[in-house]
Image: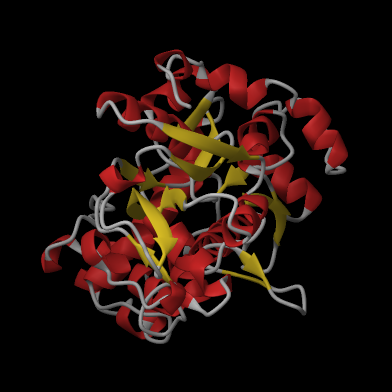
Amino acid sequence: MIHLRHIVRRIVKRLWLGTLPLLAAAGLPAHAADGDTLAQARSRGTLRCGVSEGIAGFSAKDAAGRWSGLDVDFCRAVAAAALGRADKVTFVALKASARFPALRTGVVDLISRNTTWTLARESTLGVQFAGILFYDGQAFMVPQQGAPKSIAALDRATVCVEKGTSSEEHLAAYFAAKRLSISPLAVDSATEVADAFFAGRCLAYTADASHLAAVRLRGRGGSQAYVILPERISKEPLGPVVRNDDQQWLTLVRWVLFSLIAAEENGITQSNVRERMRDPLLGAALEPGDDASKALGVDPGWSVRAVQSVGNYGEMFERNLGAQSPLKLERGLNRPWTQGGLMYAPPMR
């Protein structure tokens, strides 16, 4: 059962404890990063991007070995901006518990992996978030048949959760605050958590709502056999993460994200970006000028390359998560600010 003492466990200890063996077991080098991320990526000819082990709609690999998803598309956009081509990216699948150590030790240049932006992470792990790629919230999934109608009905139940995530912390804190009891089943990887849930080892599975929507596609009986309860117990702003020792790289990654958001706001798409850039007013939305490009260390036209490689933010969303995807998620808070959402990009100039 959950007791109050579980809440005070330190995030850093859980994330770092045993991480070098984890990296070694995955066959990943554990060398120290030394600053100029862009120069290192250019030297090796590829951007190394940390993604999930397989979450539909965000980062998943098909039978042919090709990666797809919102997080994957963002990595390709950064590669196009930084290295000139969207295919100059190597995807490194990481468990949640290994993602920050992999970034800090230089195994990856960037994390784009359903990662929640928190003060605790930025202040203690030596990382910085470049922005918000997806607004989400923590939810609970239960079987449709005989499903509890609310989170309160999970009192004394076993709940599956992935180890080393903010979901594990929120689960403990929420039930303690509500004076409810649960038995958490914390499992080391997202795949194993899903397997435990579908095998009936726990009554509920808690994670970000979008993650649960992806996971239930795998369930016996299809997505209709499972219900995601409507309540949310946390805010989960998910975004790309870099080390905090390279301000130039942080700025570039951040403004690639803003470029994708600004493109949608201005009606600039993957297919029309070159044509629309001839309009001086529209061009200003995506063209920061040669001085800014030089300061970032990239060739001019980097923001256009990003959009041309994967489309604007809306195209990425609909293709991977929305109407054109199996998940069929609503845009919700991830709509542009002009349509009632929270997606907003500062001006380039």
- Provide residue 199's location: percent of width, then percent of height: 63, 60
Residue drawn at 41 percent across, 58 percent down: 141
* Left-right relation of 272 to 225: left
- Mark yes or no: residue 289 visible: no
- Mark yes or no: residue 329 visible: yes
Q: How many marks?
A: 0
Image quadrant in which you'd find residue 272: bottom left
* Left-right relation of 25 to 269: right
Residue drawn at 41 percent across, 51 percent down: 208
> Who is closer to the viewer here, 246 or 138?
138
> Who is closer to the viewer here, 138 or 3?
3
> Who is closer to the viewer here, 309 or 179?
179
- Provide residue 67's location: percent of width, then percent of height: 66, 69
Image quadrant in which you'd find residue 16: top right
Q: Is residue 158 above or below residue 339?
A: above
Q: In this view, does 53 lie above or below 237?
A: below
Residue drawn at 36 percent across, 45 percent down: 154
- Provide residue 89's location: percent of width, then percent of height: 69, 60
- Provide residue 187's location: percent of width, then percent of height: 63, 41
Q: Is residue 138 above or below residue 91?
A: above
